[in-house]
Image (spheres, rainbow, N blue to C red):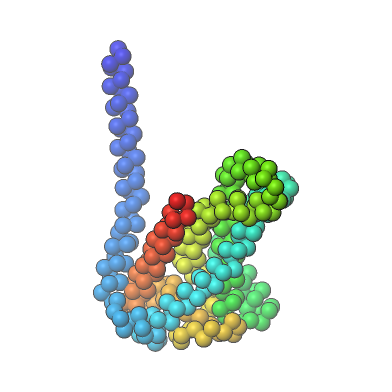
C-alpha cells in the first residue's frame, strides 16, 4: 500500500510539472513569436545609415529618435531615482506608521494608473497651464511620475529587509539615526534599489501615450532646450509608422522596435552586472 501511495504521488507530481511546463510554453510562445518577427524584420532594415540619419517624413533614419529616447529616460532617471530613494528612507526609517502606510498605499495605487491618464495630466498641467509646450522637461517629469512609485516601493522593500540587528549595532556604536539610515540601511539596500531602477527604466522606455501628450514629435535632433522644443522617440516611430501604407515606414517601425529591444536589453545587462557587483 505504501508503494502504491508513493507511485500515485510521483505520478501526480509529474502530471502537475508537465501541466506547468505546458502552461509556461503557451505563455511564452506569443512572446517568442513577437521577438522573432521584430528581430528578423528589424535586422533587415538596420544599417549604420539608419542609426546616424534623422527621420525624414516616414523614411530616413532613427538618430533623432534614439537620442531623444535616451535623453527622456535619463532625464527621468535623474529626477525619479533620488526622489524615490529619499521617499523610501522617509517611509522606512522616519515616518509614523500611519503615514508610512498611506504613502505605500498611494504608491501602489499610482502604479495601476493608466499611462495615458498620466500623460493627459502632464499635458494639462505642464504643456497647457505652465505654458511649456511640447518639451523635454514636460515629458521627463511625466515619465518621472510613472517611474517614481516603482523605485520607491522597491527601495522601501529592500530597506525593510535589512536586519534590525544592523540598525541596533550602529546605534549602539554611537551613530545617529540619520547616519545609520544613510550609511547602514541605504548601503545594504543598494541591490534592491537598483532592481527597482532597472524595472522602472524598462517601463519608461516602452511608453508611448504619455510622450505623445508631452513630448510631441520632432524629426530633428534634440536641441537640449527644456521648453517649447518637441522631441523624437522610438516608440512613436513604432506606433505611428506601422500604420502608414508605405514599405519604408514599416521597415523603419520594425527597426525602431528592434533598436528599442536592444536598448532595454543592454540596460538590463549593465544593471544586473552592477547589482551583482554591489551585492558581492
Q: Residue at 31%, 43% (x, y): give it.
A: 22
Q: Residue at 31%, 57% (x, y): give it.
A: 32
Q: Is residue 262 above or below residue 68?
A: above
Q: Is residue 227 above or below residue 100?
A: below
Instruction: Find the residue positioned furthest to the top.
Output: 1
Image quadrant of residue 11? top left
Q: Is residue 173 above or below residue 262?
A: above
Residue 70, horizontal then vertical, whole percent: 47, 74
Residue 41, horizontal then vertical, whole percent: 28, 71
Position of 33 with respect to 268 (left or right) is left
Q: Quadrant of the N terminus?
A: top left
Q: For this rendering, which residue is in front, 268 or 113?
A: 268
Image quadrant of residue 272? bottom left
Number of labels in the image equals 0
Residue 7, horizontal then vertical, whole percent: 28, 22
Instruction: Find the residue positioned furthest to the front.
Output: 173
Q: Residue at 29%, 79% (x, y): give it.
A: 47
Does residue 108 appear in the picture of this structure? no
Position of 17 with respect to 206 (left or right) is left
Q: For this rendering, which residue is in front, 113 or 45?
A: 45
Residue 244, horizontal then vertical, whole percent: 37, 78
Position of 73 with respect to 156 (left or right) is left
Q: Residue at 40%, 85% (x, y): give it.
A: 54
Q: Is residue 102 above or below residue 11?
A: below
Does residue 173 appear in the picture of this structure? yes
Amino acid at each position: 500500500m505504501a508503494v502504491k501511495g508513493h507511485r500515485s504521488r510521483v505520478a501526480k507530481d509529474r502530471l502537475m510539472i508537465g501541466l506547468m511546463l505546458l502552461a509556461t510554453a503557451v505563455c511564452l510562445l506569443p512572446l517568442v513569436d513577437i521577438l522573432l518577427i521584430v528581430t528578423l524584420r528589424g535586422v533587415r532594415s538596420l544599417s549604420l545609415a539608419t542609426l546616424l540619419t534623422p527621420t525624414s517624413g516616414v523614411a530616413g533614419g532613427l538618430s533623432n529618435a534614439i537620442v531623444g529616447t535616451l535623453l527622456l529616460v535619463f532625464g527621468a532617471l535623474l529626477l525619479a531615482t533620488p526622489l524615490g530613494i529619499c521617499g523610501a528612507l522617509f517611509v522606512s526609517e522616519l515616518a509614523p506608521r500611519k503615514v508610512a502606510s498611506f504613502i505605500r498605499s498611494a504608491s501602489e495605487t499610482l502604479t495601476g494608473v493608466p499611462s495615458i491618464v498620466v500623460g493627459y495630466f502632464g499635458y494639462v498641467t505642464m504643456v497647457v497651464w505652465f505654458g511649456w509646450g511640447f518639451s523635454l522637461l514636460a515629458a521627463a517629469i511625466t515619465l518621472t511620475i510613472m517611474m517614481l512609485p516603482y523605485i520607491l516601493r522597491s527601495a522601501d522593500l529592500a530597506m525593510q529587509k535589512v536586519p534590525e540587528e544592523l540598525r541596533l549595532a550602529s546605534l549602539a556604536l554611537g551613530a545617529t539615526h540619520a547616519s545609520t539610515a544613510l550609511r547602514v540601511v541605504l548601503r545594504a539596500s543598494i541591490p534592491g534599489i537598483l532592481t527597482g531602477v532597472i524595472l522602472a527604466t524598462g517601463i519608461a522606455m516602452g511608453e508611448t501615450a504619455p510622450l505623445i501628450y508631452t513630448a510631441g514629435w520632432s524629426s530633428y535632433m534634440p536641441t537640449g532646450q527644456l521648453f517649447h522644443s518637441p522631441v523624437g522617440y522610438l516608440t512613436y516611430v513604432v506606433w505611428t509608422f506601422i500604420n502608414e501604407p508605405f514599405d519604408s515606414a514599416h521597415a523603419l517601425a520594425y527597426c525602431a522596435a528592434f533598436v528599442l529591444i536592444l536598448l532595454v536589453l543592454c540596460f538590463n545587462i549593465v544593471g544586473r552586472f552592477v547589482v551583482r557587483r554591489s551585492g558581492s
